[in-house]
Amino acid sequence: MKRGMTLIESIMVVILMGIMAFVFSVFILEGADAWRFITVQNNLALSSRAAVYIMAREIKRIKDVASLTTYASTEVAFTDVDNNPVAFRQSGAYLMRNSDVLLKKLKFPGGLFISYLNASGHQTATRDEIRTINIHVIVEDGTNRFIVDTAARLRNL
């Protein structure tokens, strides 16, 4: 009567177990990569939507058109209804509100684009004609990219 396994049988078992482990690991890694991508995408979405919401809410509080001190494509500065100065701009990969970081991982360059519309919805460069401010934000983290667009109509006009 023979007991145990021969050396060849043991090697075959180890090789088969290695092949099975490799096949299963490919599926597990693909699932982990997909989970990581979705998690990063969700984090980008939440943070960028929150930042754009804050921008739009504060832009709606502009005291009047004369309170717009800076209205460029990458920066907007104004005085709100409480006479507080507010400025939004891109600094490197950060979206800044005054001197505070509002959002990280902004695409650099070109992560923040602001446009100004008149009463009929056309772009304008004249401060007295501005009625709506469009905000376009692009956030990137590795291969993930998230874009948020919104518009804030000036209330106090």
Image (tube, rainbow, N blue to C red):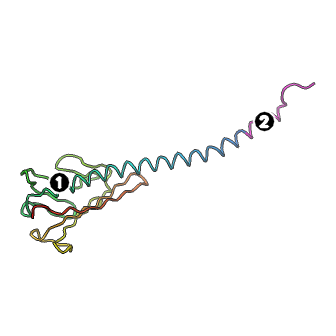
Q: Main secondary structure of the magenta part?
A: helix
Q: Earlier in the sequence, mark 1 or mark 2?
A: 2
Q: Secondary structure under badge 2?
A: helix
Which of label 1 and label 2 is nearer to you? 1
Within 10 Å of disc 1 (Cα), the crowding (few <14, some 14-19, many 20+) is: some
Q: Residue at x 49, y 47 (%)?
A: 35
Q: Amino acid at mark 1?
A: Glu
Task: Using the image as rendered, state which of residue 155 and residue 4 is in the foreground.
Answer: 155
- Image check: 19 left or right of 38? right
- Image check: 15 left or right of 63? right
Q: Secondary structure under badge 1?
A: helix
Q: Amino acid at mark 2?
A: Ile
Q: Position of residue 98 (x, y in %)?
A: 16, 49
Q: Residue at x 17, y 47 (%)?
A: 99
Q: Which residue is mark 1?
A: 58
Q: Is residue 63 above or below residue 128?
A: above
Q: Position of residue 81 (x, y in %)?
A: 8, 54
Q: Position of residue 68 (x, y in %)?
A: 10, 61
In the image, the segment drawn in magenta is 1-16
Q: Residue at x 70, y 40 (%)?
A: 18
Task: Using the image as rendered, state which of residue 38 and residue 8 is in the foreground.
Answer: 38
Q: Which residue is mark 2?
A: 11
Q: Position of residue 89 (x, y in %)?
A: 21, 55
